[in-house]
Image (tube, grey):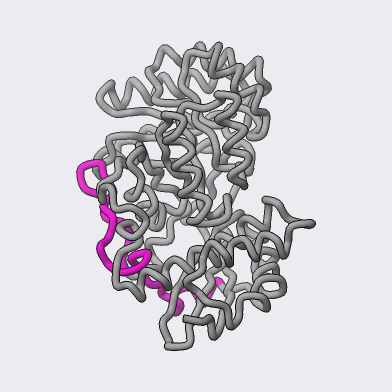
């Protein structure tokens, strides 16, 4: 089925309250670009990518100006071919970064269109391993006082989460350690605890943190250093005492290949919205499996549930603070600490554009 039309819409969606992570700083909202592809028979596929606010217009322009002209009238079922065509079209100024974000939205819409035509959920077409994935609460709380972090942890547990993540990167490592200790004492040993430093430290400080945090039985320490210091990650994994998670800021399959080559990670964490879509995400998952590693995800949980449910090495899925539950027809269902993949065709939901229109930016 050939592509008849492509619509590209961008939004800035406000958060309920400001949240902070070390690398991003204080955030009051997030950007989102939604691509709608219609084929010649009127079938519709939708996909989205998300980013920090005030960046969505740039991503939308790449799709509108660079990809849309080369996609119209193309066979929408040739997804690998179209992915490569987009990559090549923006090769010189691309190779990751904003281009990966832009391709991701188009790639997602193409997969949604294909699986809707097949009247099958995405997770079954991609491999159909298990519709249940362990989830964790991906709190963004660096700016919160410890009392609020503890209150939110209680809410997470009441909501059924068996695993909780908190943020690190305060002014001193001592304060970070004190906050982790307070959360661990509050939630007990039965609830898994993860900590995300969001690139806060040099390698030497990250190593010290990894050793000191080992006292609190963390499932992992996430992104303690800059994301592309592969030798640094290898050093931390070899010499630290807390497992390492990383990958949300890697934008290509090749970057993950380097991370694995240097043996720099225990829990790879790709994000389809940042690495170029479903097509490379599944390749990263297979590459992780070939290296005897698990796979998990960052952000976009309403869609990642479909991807991870196709992966035999799926370990965890982050339920991110940048949620779109209020703007889609069928939000993620969580039961007893597990996300459940929908059996509806495609990605499993439709966007509520009436609710979103107040936040439209293009």
Residue toward you, 185 or 292: 292
- Give percent across and percent down for residue 86: 65, 64
Residue 355 falls inside the magenta stretch: yes
Residue situated furthest left in the rendering: 336
Q: Residue at x 55, y 38 (%)?
A: 247
Query: Which residues are drawn in magenta?
Result: 330-359
Q: In this view, does 280 lie to the left or right of 343?
A: right
Q: Is residue 258 shown above or below 325? A: above
Q: Is residue 12 visible?
A: no
- Give percent across and percent down for residue 68: 64, 76
Q: In which quarter of the image is residue 85?
A: bottom right
Q: Residue at x 33, y 52 (%)?
A: 127
Q: Is residue 167 shown above or below 39? A: above
Exactly how many numbered labels are in the figure?
A: 0
Q: Is residue 252 left or right of residue 211?
A: right
Residue toward you, 70 or 298: 70
Q: Quarter of the image containing the C terminus?
A: bottom right
């Amino acid at each position: 089925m050939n592509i008849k039309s492509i619509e590209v819409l961008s939004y800035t969606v406000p958060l309920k309250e400001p949240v902070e992570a070390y690398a991003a700083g204080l955030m009051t909202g997030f950007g989102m670009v939604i691509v709608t592809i219609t084929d010649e028979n009127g079938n519709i596929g939708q996909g989205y990518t998300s980013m920090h606010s005030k960046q969505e217009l740039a991503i939308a322009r790449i799709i509108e100006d660079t990809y849309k002209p080369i996609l119209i009238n193309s066979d929408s079922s040739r997804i690998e071919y179209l992915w490569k065509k987009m990559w090549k079209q923006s090769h010189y100024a691309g190779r990751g970064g904003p281009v990966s974000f832009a391709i991701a939205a188009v790639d997602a819409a193409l997969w949604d269109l294909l699986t809707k035509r097949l009247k099958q959920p995405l997770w079954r077409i991609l491999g159909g391993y298990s519709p249940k994935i362990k989830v964790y609460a991906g709190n963004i709380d660096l700016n919160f006082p410890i009392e609020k972090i503890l209150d939110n942890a209680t809410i997470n547990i009441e909501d059924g989460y068996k695993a909780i993540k908190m943020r690190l990167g305060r002014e001193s490592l001592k304060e970070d350690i004190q906050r982790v200790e307070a959360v661990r004492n509050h939630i007990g040993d039965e609830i898994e605890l993860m900590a995300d430093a969001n690139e806060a430290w040099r390698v030497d400080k990250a190593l010290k943190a990894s050793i000191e945090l080992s006292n609190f039985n963390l499932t992992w320490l996430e992104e303690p250093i800059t994301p592309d210091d592969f030798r640094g990650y290898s050093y931390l994994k070899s010499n630290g005492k807390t497992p390492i998670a990383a990958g949300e800021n890697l934008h290509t399959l090749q970057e993950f290949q380097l991370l694995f080559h240097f043996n720099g990670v225990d829990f790879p964490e790709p994000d389809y919205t940042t690495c170029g879509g479903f097509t490379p995400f599944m390749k990263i998952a297979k590459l992780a499996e070939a290296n005897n590693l698990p796979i998990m995800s960052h952000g976009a949980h309403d869609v990642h549930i479909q991807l991870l449910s196709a992966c035999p090495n799926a370990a965890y899925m982050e339920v991110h603070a940048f949620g779109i539950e209020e703007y889609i027809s069928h939000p993620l269902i969580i039961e007893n600490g597990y996300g459940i993949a929908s059996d509806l065709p495609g990605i499993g939901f439709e966007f509520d554009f009436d609710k979103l229109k107040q936040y439209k930016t293009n």
